[in-house]
Protein backbone atom coordinates (compact mmCIF):
# COMPACT_ATOMS: atom_id res chain seq x y z
CA UNK A 1 0.00 0.00 0.00
CA UNK A 2 1.13 3.54 -0.73
CA UNK A 3 0.76 4.67 2.86
CA UNK A 4 2.99 1.89 4.17
CA UNK A 5 5.51 2.60 1.39
CA UNK A 6 5.74 6.18 2.62
CA UNK A 7 6.32 4.94 6.15
CA UNK A 8 9.05 2.57 5.11
CA UNK A 9 10.69 5.29 2.99
CA UNK A 10 10.68 7.49 6.08
CA UNK A 11 12.26 4.71 8.10
CA UNK A 12 14.92 4.26 5.44
CA UNK A 13 15.65 7.98 5.46
CA UNK A 14 16.04 7.90 9.24
CA UNK A 15 18.45 4.97 9.11
CA UNK A 16 20.53 6.72 6.46
CA UNK A 17 20.71 9.89 8.58
CA UNK A 18 21.63 7.87 11.66
CA UNK A 19 24.44 6.16 9.76
CA UNK A 20 25.82 9.44 8.47
CA UNK A 21 25.80 11.06 11.91
CA UNK A 22 27.30 7.97 13.50
CA UNK A 23 30.28 8.06 11.16
CA UNK A 24 31.16 11.49 12.52
CA UNK A 25 30.57 10.49 16.14
CA UNK A 26 32.87 7.48 15.83
CA UNK A 27 35.88 9.76 15.58
CA UNK A 28 35.16 11.24 19.03
CA UNK A 29 36.45 8.32 21.13
CA UNK A 30 37.67 9.53 24.50
CA UNK A 31 39.03 8.13 27.74
CA UNK A 32 36.33 6.69 29.98
CA UNK A 33 38.11 5.85 33.24
CA UNK A 34 40.70 8.10 34.90
CA UNK A 35 41.66 7.96 38.53
CA UNK A 36 43.93 6.56 41.19
CA UNK A 37 44.93 3.38 42.99
CA UNK A 38 43.76 3.67 46.59
CA UNK A 39 46.06 1.39 48.56
CA UNK A 40 45.86 -0.05 52.04
CA UNK A 41 43.91 -3.30 51.80
CA UNK A 42 46.90 -5.04 50.17
CA UNK A 43 49.41 -3.82 52.80
CA UNK A 44 51.03 -5.90 55.52
CA UNK A 45 52.15 -9.02 53.68
CA UNK A 46 55.25 -9.61 55.79
CA UNK A 47 56.55 -12.21 58.27
CA UNK A 48 55.97 -9.97 61.27
CA UNK A 49 52.24 -9.78 60.55
CA UNK A 50 51.54 -13.39 59.51
CA UNK A 51 48.47 -14.50 57.57
CA UNK A 52 46.05 -12.88 57.14
CA UNK A 53 47.26 -9.99 59.29
CA UNK A 54 45.22 -7.95 61.73
CA UNK A 55 42.90 -5.30 60.29
CA UNK A 56 44.04 -1.73 61.03
CA UNK A 57 47.41 -3.08 62.16
CA UNK A 58 48.80 -4.93 59.15
CA UNK A 59 46.44 -3.38 56.63
CA UNK A 60 43.50 -1.01 56.27
CA UNK A 61 40.95 0.18 53.72
CA UNK A 62 40.82 3.64 52.14
CA UNK A 63 38.17 5.92 53.55
CA UNK A 64 35.12 7.71 52.20
CA UNK A 65 37.01 10.98 52.75
CA UNK A 66 39.62 9.88 50.24
CA UNK A 67 37.02 8.92 47.65
CA UNK A 68 35.35 12.30 48.20
CA UNK A 69 38.64 14.13 47.74
CA UNK A 70 39.61 12.43 44.49
CA UNK A 71 36.11 12.65 43.07
CA UNK A 72 36.09 16.32 43.97
CA UNK A 73 39.27 16.71 41.93
CA UNK A 74 37.49 15.19 38.94
CA UNK A 75 38.64 11.56 39.11
CA UNK A 76 35.91 9.06 38.28
CA UNK A 77 37.77 5.78 38.93
CA UNK A 78 39.37 4.04 41.89
CA UNK A 79 41.47 0.91 41.55
CA UNK A 80 41.25 -0.96 44.85
CA UNK A 81 44.11 -3.38 45.59
CA UNK A 82 43.33 -6.07 48.19
CA UNK A 83 44.62 -9.56 49.14
CA UNK A 84 42.82 -12.71 47.99
CA UNK A 85 43.84 -14.61 51.14
CA UNK A 86 42.05 -12.15 53.42
CA UNK A 87 38.78 -12.40 51.54
CA UNK A 88 38.88 -16.17 50.93
CA UNK A 89 40.83 -17.84 53.74
CA UNK A 90 41.07 -21.22 51.97
CA UNK A 91 40.49 -22.48 48.45
CA UNK A 92 36.83 -22.98 47.51
CA UNK A 93 35.67 -21.56 50.87
CA UNK A 94 32.97 -18.97 51.41
CA UNK A 95 34.29 -15.42 51.79
CA UNK A 96 35.27 -14.23 55.22
CA UNK A 97 32.29 -12.23 56.45
CA UNK A 98 34.27 -9.45 58.15
CA UNK A 99 36.49 -8.86 55.13
CA UNK A 100 33.54 -9.05 52.77
CA UNK A 101 31.78 -6.38 54.83
CA UNK A 102 34.80 -4.09 54.54
CA UNK A 103 34.99 -4.59 50.80
CA UNK A 104 31.23 -4.10 50.40
CA UNK A 105 31.30 -0.91 52.43
CA UNK A 106 33.98 0.64 50.24
CA UNK A 107 32.49 -0.49 46.93
CA UNK A 108 28.95 0.54 47.79
CA UNK A 109 30.03 3.93 49.09
CA UNK A 110 32.25 4.76 46.11
CA UNK A 111 29.94 3.48 43.38
CA UNK A 112 26.97 5.06 45.14
CA UNK A 113 28.62 8.43 44.47
CA UNK A 114 29.02 7.55 40.80
CA UNK A 115 32.65 6.41 40.85
CA UNK A 116 33.90 3.28 39.11
CA UNK A 117 35.72 0.77 41.32
CA UNK A 118 38.28 -1.63 39.85
CA UNK A 119 38.63 -4.70 42.06
CA UNK A 120 42.28 -5.76 42.05
CA UNK A 121 43.39 -8.92 43.87
CA UNK A 122 46.94 -7.72 44.42
CA UNK A 123 48.52 -11.17 44.54
CA UNK A 124 51.04 -11.36 41.66
CA UNK A 125 49.32 -14.65 40.63
CA UNK A 126 50.13 -16.25 44.00
CA UNK A 127 47.99 -17.57 46.84
CA UNK A 128 49.56 -17.92 50.30
CA UNK A 129 53.13 -17.49 49.05
CA UNK A 130 56.02 -17.31 51.53
CA UNK A 131 55.72 -14.02 53.39
CA UNK A 132 59.33 -13.14 52.69
CA UNK A 133 58.90 -13.60 48.90
CA UNK A 134 55.26 -12.92 48.22
CA UNK A 135 55.63 -11.23 44.82
CA UNK A 136 57.64 -13.77 42.84
CA UNK A 137 57.92 -16.97 44.86
CA UNK A 138 58.15 -20.36 43.15
CA UNK A 139 55.32 -21.75 45.28
CA UNK A 140 51.62 -20.97 45.49
CA UNK A 141 51.44 -19.99 41.82
CA UNK A 142 48.02 -19.77 40.21
CA UNK A 143 47.56 -22.54 37.67
CA UNK A 144 49.88 -24.95 39.50
CA UNK A 145 48.78 -28.12 41.33
CA UNK A 146 48.96 -26.11 44.58
CA UNK A 147 46.53 -23.47 43.29
CA UNK A 148 44.61 -24.97 40.37
CA UNK A 149 42.65 -22.94 37.86
CA UNK A 150 39.46 -24.23 39.46
CA UNK A 151 40.37 -22.45 42.71
CA UNK A 152 41.06 -19.19 40.89
CA UNK A 153 37.80 -19.56 38.95
CA UNK A 154 35.90 -20.25 42.17
CA UNK A 155 37.26 -17.06 43.72
CA UNK A 156 36.16 -14.98 40.74
CA UNK A 157 32.80 -16.70 40.49
CA UNK A 158 32.03 -15.70 44.07
CA UNK A 159 33.30 -12.14 43.63
CA UNK A 160 31.50 -11.60 40.32
CA UNK A 161 28.30 -13.07 41.70
CA UNK A 162 28.37 -10.51 44.47
CA UNK A 163 28.93 -7.45 42.25
CA UNK A 164 27.43 -8.44 38.90
CA UNK A 165 24.47 -6.11 39.37
CA UNK A 166 26.67 -3.08 39.92
CA UNK A 167 27.70 -1.72 36.53
CA UNK A 168 30.26 0.59 38.14
CA UNK A 169 32.41 -2.34 39.29
CA UNK A 170 35.24 -3.49 37.01
CA UNK A 171 37.00 -6.84 37.47
CA UNK A 172 40.83 -6.72 37.28
CA UNK A 173 41.72 -10.43 37.27
CA UNK A 174 45.11 -10.14 38.99
CA UNK A 175 47.93 -7.74 39.73
CA UNK A 176 51.18 -8.33 37.82
CA UNK A 177 51.53 -12.07 37.14
CA UNK A 178 55.19 -13.00 36.83
CA UNK A 179 57.77 -15.79 36.84
CA UNK A 180 55.46 -18.36 35.32
CA UNK A 181 54.82 -19.64 31.78
CA UNK A 182 52.66 -17.16 29.91
CA UNK A 183 50.47 -20.04 28.72
CA UNK A 184 49.86 -21.03 32.34
CA UNK A 185 48.68 -17.53 33.17
CA UNK A 186 46.49 -17.38 30.03
CA UNK A 187 44.79 -20.65 30.98
CA UNK A 188 44.08 -19.35 34.50
CA UNK A 189 42.77 -16.05 33.15
CA UNK A 190 40.41 -17.78 30.72
CA UNK A 191 39.12 -20.03 33.49
CA UNK A 192 38.36 -16.97 35.62
CA UNK A 193 36.69 -15.14 32.72
CA UNK A 194 34.47 -18.14 31.98
CA UNK A 195 33.49 -18.33 35.67
CA UNK A 196 32.65 -14.61 35.75
CA UNK A 197 30.45 -14.83 32.68
CA UNK A 198 28.75 -17.98 34.00
CA UNK A 199 27.33 -15.85 36.85
CA UNK A 200 25.59 -13.62 34.31
CA UNK A 201 27.99 -10.72 34.96
CA UNK A 202 28.71 -8.54 31.94
CA UNK A 203 31.05 -6.13 33.76
CA UNK A 204 34.24 -4.97 32.08
CA UNK A 205 37.14 -7.36 32.77
CA UNK A 206 40.77 -6.19 32.82
CA UNK A 207 43.26 -8.90 31.86
CA UNK A 208 46.96 -8.47 32.69
CA UNK A 209 49.81 -10.23 30.94
CA UNK A 210 52.79 -12.13 32.26
CA UNK A 211 56.16 -10.55 33.13
CA UNK A 212 54.67 -7.95 35.52
CA UNK A 213 52.34 -6.89 32.64
CA UNK A 214 54.65 -4.13 31.44
CA UNK A 215 53.49 -2.30 28.35
CA UNK A 216 57.08 -1.84 27.15
CA UNK A 217 57.88 -5.57 27.44
CA UNK A 218 54.63 -6.84 25.90
CA UNK A 219 56.51 -8.18 22.89
CA UNK A 220 59.60 -9.43 24.78
CA UNK A 221 60.38 -13.07 25.49
CA UNK A 222 62.62 -12.91 28.57
CA UNK A 223 59.65 -14.05 30.70
CA UNK A 224 58.52 -16.76 28.27
CA UNK A 225 56.17 -16.59 25.31
CA UNK A 226 55.58 -12.87 24.65
CA UNK A 227 52.28 -11.48 25.84
CA UNK A 228 51.86 -10.10 22.33
CA UNK A 229 51.54 -13.69 21.12
CA UNK A 230 49.99 -15.66 23.97
CA UNK A 231 47.50 -13.10 25.24
CA UNK A 232 45.74 -12.99 21.89
CA UNK A 233 44.26 -16.24 23.20
CA UNK A 234 42.02 -14.50 25.74
CA UNK A 235 38.50 -15.90 25.42
CA UNK A 236 35.64 -13.79 26.77
CA UNK A 237 32.12 -15.04 25.99
CA UNK A 238 30.88 -11.54 26.84
CA UNK A 239 33.44 -9.80 24.62
CA UNK A 240 33.88 -7.03 27.17
CA UNK A 241 37.50 -7.03 28.23
CA UNK A 242 40.64 -4.93 27.95
CA UNK A 243 44.29 -5.56 28.74
CA UNK A 244 45.65 -4.16 31.98
CA UNK A 245 49.24 -2.92 31.61
CA UNK A 246 51.58 -1.00 33.91
CA UNK A 247 54.34 1.39 32.96
CA UNK A 248 56.94 3.05 35.14
CA UNK A 249 59.63 5.33 33.83
CA UNK A 250 62.91 4.45 35.55
CA UNK A 251 65.66 2.39 33.92
CA UNK A 252 64.16 -1.06 34.61
CA UNK A 253 60.49 -0.06 34.62
CA UNK A 254 60.04 -1.11 38.25
CA UNK A 255 59.07 2.27 39.67
CA UNK A 256 61.48 1.68 42.54
CA UNK A 257 63.32 4.97 42.07
CA UNK A 258 62.59 8.57 41.07
CA UNK A 259 64.63 8.21 37.88
CA UNK A 260 63.03 9.36 34.61
CA UNK A 261 64.88 7.71 31.76
CA UNK A 262 67.68 5.18 31.64
CA UNK A 263 71.32 5.17 32.65
CA UNK A 264 72.24 5.66 28.98
CA UNK A 265 69.58 8.32 28.35
CA UNK A 266 68.85 10.06 31.66
CA UNK A 267 66.19 12.73 32.10
CA UNK A 268 64.26 11.62 29.01
CA UNK A 269 60.93 13.48 28.91
CA UNK A 270 59.71 11.21 26.08
CA UNK A 271 60.30 7.92 27.84
CA UNK A 272 56.61 7.41 28.65
CA UNK A 273 55.61 7.80 25.02
CA UNK A 274 58.48 5.60 23.86
CA UNK A 275 57.49 2.80 26.25
CA UNK A 276 53.82 2.85 25.22
CA UNK A 277 54.23 3.16 21.45
CA UNK A 278 54.83 -0.45 20.38
CA UNK A 279 52.06 -1.73 22.65
CA UNK A 280 49.63 0.89 21.34
CA UNK A 281 50.38 -0.16 17.77
CA UNK A 282 49.80 -3.80 18.76
CA UNK A 283 46.38 -2.83 20.13
CA UNK A 284 45.47 -1.10 16.89
CA UNK A 285 46.72 -3.98 14.74
CA UNK A 286 44.62 -6.50 16.64
CA UNK A 287 41.62 -4.25 17.37
CA UNK A 288 42.07 -4.56 21.15
CA UNK A 289 41.64 -2.19 24.10
CA UNK A 290 43.78 -1.47 27.15
CA UNK A 291 43.81 0.28 30.50
CA UNK A 292 46.97 1.74 32.06
CA UNK A 293 46.50 0.36 35.56
CA UNK A 294 49.67 1.76 37.16
CA UNK A 295 52.10 4.55 36.36
CA UNK A 296 53.67 7.36 38.31
CA UNK A 297 56.31 10.06 38.58
CA UNK A 298 57.93 11.14 41.84
CA UNK A 299 56.55 14.39 43.23
CA UNK A 300 60.13 15.51 43.75
CA UNK A 301 60.59 15.55 39.95
CA UNK A 302 57.66 17.91 39.32
CA UNK A 303 58.05 21.69 39.19
CA UNK A 304 60.90 23.91 38.10
CA UNK A 305 64.61 23.87 38.65
CA UNK A 306 66.49 20.95 40.14
CA UNK A 307 65.57 18.93 43.19
CA UNK A 308 67.22 16.24 45.29
CA UNK A 309 66.42 13.58 42.65
CA UNK A 310 67.49 15.58 39.61
CA UNK A 311 65.97 18.08 37.17
CA UNK A 312 62.26 18.58 37.73
CA UNK A 313 61.06 17.23 34.38
CA UNK A 314 58.27 15.03 35.71
CA UNK A 315 55.50 17.37 34.60
CA UNK A 316 56.81 17.56 31.02
CA UNK A 317 57.19 13.78 30.97
CA UNK A 318 53.62 13.24 32.20
CA UNK A 319 52.19 15.76 29.76
CA UNK A 320 53.86 13.97 26.85
CA UNK A 321 52.71 10.56 28.06
CA UNK A 322 49.11 11.55 28.80
CA UNK A 323 48.79 13.49 25.55
CA UNK A 324 49.83 10.30 23.77
CA UNK A 325 47.29 8.16 25.63
CA UNK A 326 44.52 10.65 24.98
CA UNK A 327 45.43 10.93 21.30
CA UNK A 328 45.05 7.15 21.06
CA UNK A 329 41.84 6.85 23.02
CA UNK A 330 40.42 4.63 20.31
CA UNK A 331 42.38 1.83 22.01
CA UNK A 332 43.14 3.27 25.47
CA UNK A 333 40.17 3.22 27.87
CA UNK A 334 41.85 5.18 30.64
CA UNK A 335 44.39 5.09 33.46
CA UNK A 336 44.89 4.99 37.22
CA UNK A 337 47.83 6.65 38.97
CA UNK A 338 49.93 4.69 41.43
CA UNK A 339 49.07 5.55 44.18
CA UNK A 340 47.29 7.10 47.14
CA UNK A 341 45.96 5.76 50.41
CA UNK A 342 45.91 6.52 54.12
CA UNK A 343 49.24 4.87 55.03
CA UNK A 344 51.58 6.03 52.26
CA UNK A 345 53.01 8.98 54.19
CA UNK A 346 55.84 10.46 52.05
CA UNK A 347 56.07 7.71 49.43
CA UNK A 348 57.59 9.20 46.28
CA UNK A 349 54.54 8.72 44.04
CA UNK A 350 51.81 9.44 46.60
CA UNK A 351 48.82 11.43 45.43
CA UNK A 352 47.31 11.48 48.92
CA UNK A 353 46.87 15.12 49.95
CA UNK A 354 48.64 16.30 53.03
CA UNK A 355 46.36 16.88 56.05
CA UNK A 356 43.27 15.39 54.37
CA UNK A 357 40.10 17.03 55.66
CA UNK A 358 41.94 19.72 57.61
CA UNK A 359 41.97 23.49 56.91
CA UNK A 360 45.58 23.19 55.74
CA UNK A 361 44.89 20.30 53.33
CA UNK A 362 47.15 20.54 50.28
CA UNK A 363 47.40 18.73 46.94
CA UNK A 364 50.49 16.82 45.90
CA UNK A 365 52.39 18.35 42.96
CA UNK A 366 51.29 15.60 40.54
CA UNK A 367 47.59 16.41 40.93
CA UNK A 368 47.78 19.67 38.98
CA UNK A 369 49.50 17.88 36.11
CA UNK A 370 46.91 15.09 35.97
CA UNK A 371 43.73 17.16 36.20
CA UNK A 372 43.65 18.46 32.60
CA UNK A 373 43.66 14.83 31.40
CA UNK A 374 40.75 13.52 33.43
CA UNK A 375 37.73 11.96 31.77
CA UNK A 376 34.55 14.05 31.92
CA UNK A 377 32.88 13.74 35.31
CA UNK A 378 29.22 14.46 34.70
CA UNK A 379 26.58 12.97 36.97
CA UNK A 380 23.98 11.14 34.87
CA UNK A 381 26.34 10.62 31.92
CA UNK A 382 25.91 6.85 31.81
CA UNK A 383 27.67 6.31 28.48
CA UNK A 384 30.68 8.44 29.40
CA UNK A 385 30.52 10.76 26.37
CA UNK A 386 30.64 13.95 28.43
CA UNK A 387 26.98 14.96 28.06
CA UNK A 388 23.78 13.96 29.83
CA UNK A 389 21.45 13.40 26.90
CA UNK A 390 18.81 11.08 25.39
CA UNK A 391 21.37 8.36 24.77
CA UNK A 392 21.99 8.12 28.53
CA UNK A 393 18.31 7.39 29.08
CA UNK A 394 18.64 4.45 26.70
CA UNK A 395 21.65 3.18 28.69
CA UNK A 396 19.70 3.57 31.94
CA UNK A 397 16.61 1.83 30.57
CA UNK A 398 18.44 -1.12 29.04
CA UNK A 399 20.74 -1.57 32.04
CA UNK A 400 18.04 -1.34 34.70
CA UNK A 401 18.59 -4.07 37.25
CA UNK A 402 22.04 -4.99 35.98
CA UNK A 403 24.11 -1.88 35.32
CA UNK A 404 21.77 0.85 36.58
CA UNK A 405 19.20 1.26 39.33
CA UNK A 406 15.82 2.99 39.49
CA UNK A 407 17.26 5.98 41.34
CA UNK A 408 19.62 6.65 38.44
CA UNK A 409 16.64 7.85 36.42
CA UNK A 410 16.12 10.77 38.81
CA UNK A 411 19.83 11.54 38.55
CA UNK A 412 19.60 11.55 34.74
CA UNK A 413 16.48 13.73 34.73
CA UNK A 414 17.93 16.26 37.17
CA UNK A 415 21.12 16.62 35.15
CA UNK A 416 19.80 16.42 31.60
CA UNK A 417 21.75 18.79 29.35
CA UNK A 418 24.82 19.05 31.56
CA UNK A 419 28.10 18.59 29.77
CA UNK A 420 31.82 18.59 30.46
CA UNK A 421 33.47 21.73 29.15
CA UNK A 422 36.99 20.77 30.25
CA UNK A 423 38.54 18.18 32.52
CA UNK A 424 36.95 18.41 35.94
CA UNK A 425 34.46 21.14 35.02
CA UNK A 426 30.83 20.84 34.00
CA UNK A 427 28.48 23.22 32.19
CA UNK A 428 24.89 23.42 33.42
CA UNK A 429 23.61 24.68 30.08
CA UNK A 430 20.83 22.39 28.88
CA UNK A 431 22.33 21.79 25.46
CA UNK A 432 22.35 18.06 24.60
CA UNK A 433 25.16 16.52 22.58
CA UNK A 434 24.52 17.45 18.95
CA UNK A 435 24.54 14.02 17.34
CA UNK A 436 22.46 12.24 19.97
CA UNK A 437 20.02 15.12 20.31
CA UNK A 438 19.65 15.43 16.54
CA UNK A 439 19.05 11.71 16.23
CA UNK A 440 16.38 11.91 18.91
CA UNK A 441 14.74 14.90 17.25
CA UNK A 442 14.92 13.47 13.74
CA UNK A 443 13.53 10.18 14.99
CA UNK A 444 10.45 11.82 16.43
CA UNK A 445 9.95 14.01 13.34
CA UNK A 446 10.13 11.03 11.01
CA UNK A 447 7.89 8.93 13.21
CA UNK A 448 5.31 11.72 13.43
CA UNK A 449 5.42 12.21 9.66
CA UNK A 450 4.95 8.50 9.11
CA UNK A 451 2.04 8.36 11.51
CA UNK A 452 0.26 11.24 9.81
CA UNK A 453 0.72 9.68 6.38
CA UNK A 454 -0.68 6.33 7.43
CA UNK A 455 -3.56 5.62 9.72
CA UNK A 456 -2.71 1.96 9.21
CA UNK A 457 0.79 2.50 10.59
CA UNK A 458 -0.27 1.16 13.99
CA UNK A 459 1.21 1.29 17.43
CA UNK A 460 3.08 -1.99 17.03
CA UNK A 461 4.89 -0.79 13.90
CA UNK A 462 5.72 2.58 15.44
CA UNK A 463 7.17 0.90 18.51
CA UNK A 464 9.14 -1.50 16.32
CA UNK A 465 10.67 1.42 14.43
CA UNK A 466 11.34 3.32 17.65
CA UNK A 467 13.07 0.24 19.05
CA UNK A 468 15.28 0.00 15.97
CA UNK A 469 16.04 3.71 16.27
CA UNK A 470 17.02 3.29 19.93
CA UNK A 471 19.26 0.37 19.12
CA UNK A 472 21.02 2.43 16.47
CA UNK A 473 21.59 5.23 19.00
CA UNK A 474 23.10 2.72 21.44
CA UNK A 475 25.32 1.21 18.81
CA UNK A 476 26.72 4.57 17.78
CA UNK A 477 26.92 6.60 20.97
CA UNK A 478 27.33 4.11 23.82
CA UNK A 479 30.99 3.24 23.39
Image (cartoon, helix red, strand yellow):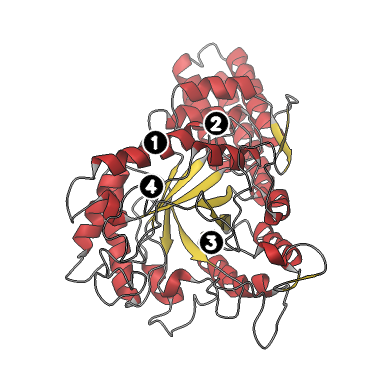
Q: Which residue corresponds to the image point at 65% horizontal and 61% vertical from the top-left?
A: 325
Q: Earlier in the sequence, mark 2 or mark 1?
A: 1
Q: Quadrant of the C terminus?
A: top right
Q: Secondary structure at mark 1?
A: helix
Residue sitting nearer the eye, 137 or 290: 137
Residue sitting nearer the eye, 88 or 365: 365
Q: Secondary structure at mark 3?
A: strand
Q: Residue furthest right?
A: 305
Distance in Å between CA atoms under marks 3 and 2 = 40 Å
Which residue in the protein does label 2 denote? 469
Q: Secondary structure at mark 2?
A: helix
Is any part of residue 479 visible from this angle?
no
Which residue in the protein does label 4 denote? 56
Residue 81 at x, y percent in the picture: 42, 54
Q: In the shown orientation, is residue 6 left or right of residue 319?
A: left
Q: Which is in the foreground here, disc 4 or disc 1? A: 4
Crowding around mark 2 (Cα neighbors within 10 Å: few <14, some 14 to 19, many 20+) is: many
Q: Which is in the foreground here, disc 4 or disc 3? A: 4
Which residue in the protein does label 1 denote? 105
Is any part of residue 190 visible from this angle?
yes
Q: Mark 4–mark 2 contact, CB under 8 Å?
A: no
Q: Earlier in the sequence, mark 4 or mark 1?
A: 4
* Quarter assignment of residue 120: bottom left
The answer to whether 474 is drawn above or below residue 118 in the figure is above
Q: Mark 4–mark 3 contact, CB under 8 Å?
A: no
Q: Which residue corresponds to the image point at 66% horizontal and 21% vertical from the top-left?
A: 445
**Which mark is drawn over residue 294?**
3
The answer to whether 472 is drawn above or below residue 314 in the figure is above
Q: In the shown orientation, is residue 94 left or right of residue 125?
A: left
Q: Mark 3–mark 1 contact, CB under 8 Å?
A: no
Amino acid sequence: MATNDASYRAAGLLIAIVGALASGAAADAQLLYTGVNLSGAEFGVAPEFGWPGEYNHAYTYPTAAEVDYFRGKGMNTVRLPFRWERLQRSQFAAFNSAEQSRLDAFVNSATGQGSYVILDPHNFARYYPPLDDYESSSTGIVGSPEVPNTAFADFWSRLAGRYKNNGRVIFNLMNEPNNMPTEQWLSAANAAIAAIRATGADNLILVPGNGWTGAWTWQNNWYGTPNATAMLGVVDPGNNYAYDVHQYLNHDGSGATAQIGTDQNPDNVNIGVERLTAFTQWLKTHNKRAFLGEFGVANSRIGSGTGPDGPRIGDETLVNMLNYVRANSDVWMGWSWWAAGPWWQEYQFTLEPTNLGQPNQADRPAMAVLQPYLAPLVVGDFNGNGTVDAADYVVWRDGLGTKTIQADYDVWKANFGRMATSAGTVSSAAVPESSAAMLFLLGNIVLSFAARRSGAFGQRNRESLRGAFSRRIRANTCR
